[in-house]
């Protein structure tokens, strides 16, 4: 049954321990067959293998959404042997794209069901409900699985997957009772799980494949569900767990990374025109240099603005300002002044943000 699962002829055994485990809510089932009425009045329904997937659920909303997505007609349907009606769509989809949840999603056992429920559940060695050794093996030997379905347990495989384009968060359960399909499904999932070790979500493709096998001189035809990672390249499947975003959009794994858009360049000239002193304009130049935006043209423009400010020209309007406006003077004609000691240098607003030495007015140097 693939890596990590040992199997003897006609049995399920070894690596799987039948224990209770947490799982997401089940929204519906994925099926590969249905039954049609038997023309004989007392005959049992006739099983039919479907070439496309069938989805069933107690919720009409889910099935209606599936019909829109995968094609098919919504119909009410009652499972064989059950009194409660459900909803069903026989889709037109020969392939489903799904997401495997974290952990090992596959559950396998040999089971025998009757009208009263599950009568036996066995791993090929021990029948779990009674604790007895495998009943089918004891009665019929290694080829017990060749017996009629109503005489022995049937190898039952279940796997829950997310269908990301359908409503709500929950799993859709895929179930098969084929002895031959059990090995193929388990082997395929083992290959898939090697990519993540069960530590994350993984996008997969599933399709129905018709196969045949020769047993005892007879050719048997059967269906299997093939499950493979749905990733752009093999290396993506072998590189470990992927993000949830990549699981939802596998193609993103092969897209080049989008570089962040560069930050918008500040309008240094507009900032400078709001300044009131040369030191403030020099601080604007310092910011431009720190951001790597310096240029000869910008320096010349900023120096021109600073020169206007020194001359008393408002850089926003070009008008000469009146620093001795009567409205700004106290009524008694006294003006407050700051007394500075002769041996103390006046502070600068930003000592590090001065003009380049080579560009000082009157220096005789050129940039």
Image (cartoon, rainbow, N blue to C red):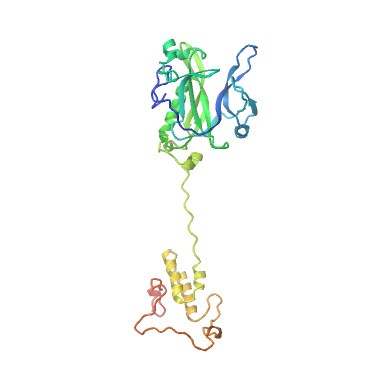
- Which image quadrant: the C terminus? bottom left
Residue 44 image-quadrant placement: top right
Residue at point 54%, 87% (across, down): 331
Q: Nearer the viewer, residue 27 or 129?
A: 129
Q: Is residue 251 visible?
A: yes
Q: Position of residue 70 (x, y in %)?
A: 60, 32
Report how many numbered discs are placed on residues in the image. 0
Q: Position of residue 262 (x, y in %)?
A: 48, 57
- The picture places residue 161, in percent across and down from the top left corner, at 51, 32
Q: Quadrant of the N terminus?
A: top left
Who's the residue at 42% across and 16% down the image? 134
Q: Is residue 295 above or below residue 337?
A: above
View extreme (bottom): residue: 333
Q: Is residue 249 above or below residue 71?
A: below
| Residue 294 pos. (x, y %) | 44, 67
Q: Residue at x 41, y 65 (%)?
A: 290
**Which residue is at a point 56% across and 30% down the rendered structure image?**
28
Q: Is 309 drawn above or below residue 64 in the view shown?
A: below
- Front residue (pair 80, 100): 80
- Please indicate, yes or no, whether residue 294 appears anywhere in the rendered image: no
């Amino acid at each position: 049954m693939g890596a990590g699962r040992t199997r003897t002829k006609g049995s399920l055994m070894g690596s799987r321990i039948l224990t209770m485990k947490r799982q997401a809510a089940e929204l519906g089932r994925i099926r590969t067959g249905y039954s049609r009425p038997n023309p004989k009045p007392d005959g049992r329904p006739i099983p039919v293998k479907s070439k496309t997937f069938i989805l069933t659920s107690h919720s009409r909303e889910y099935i209606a959404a599936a019909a829109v997505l995968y094609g098919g007609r919504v119909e009410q349907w009652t499972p064989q042997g059950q009194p409660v009606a459900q909803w069903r769509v026989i889709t037109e989809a020969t392939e489903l794209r799904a997401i495997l949840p974290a952990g090992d999603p596959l559950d396998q056992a040999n089971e025998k069901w009757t009208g009263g429920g599950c009568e036996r559940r066995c791993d090929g060695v021990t029948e779990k409900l009674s604790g007895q050794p495998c009943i089918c093996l004891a009665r019929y030997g290694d080829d017990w699985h060749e017996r009629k379905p109503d005489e022995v347990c049937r190898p039952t495989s279940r796997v829950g997957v997310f269908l990301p384009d359908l409503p709500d968060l929950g799993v859709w359960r895929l179930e098969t009772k084929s002895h031959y399909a059990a090995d193929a499904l388990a082997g395929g999932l083992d290959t898939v799980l090697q990519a993540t070790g069960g530590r994350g979500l993984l996008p997969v493709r599933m399709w129905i494949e018709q196969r045949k096998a020769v047993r005892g001189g007879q050719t048997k035809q059967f269906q299997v569900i093939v499950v493979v990672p749905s990733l752009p390249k093999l290396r993506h499947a072998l590189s470990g767990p992927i993000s949830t975003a990549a699981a939802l959009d596998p193609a993103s794994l092969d897209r080049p990374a989008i570089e962040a858009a560069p930050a918008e360049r500040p309008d240094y000239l507009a900032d400078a025109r709001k300044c009131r002193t040369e030191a403030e304009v020099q601080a604007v130049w310092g910011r431009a240099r720190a951001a790597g935006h310096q240029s000869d043209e910008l320096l010349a423009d900023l120096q021109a603005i600073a020169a206007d400010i020194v001359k008393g020209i408002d850089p926003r309007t070009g008008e000469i300002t009146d620093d001795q406006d009567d409205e700004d003077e106290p009524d008694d004609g006294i003006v407050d002044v700051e007394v500075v000691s002769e041996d103390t240098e006046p502070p600068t607003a930003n000592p590090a943000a001065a003009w380049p030495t080579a560009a000082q007015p009157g220096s005789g140097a050129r940039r």
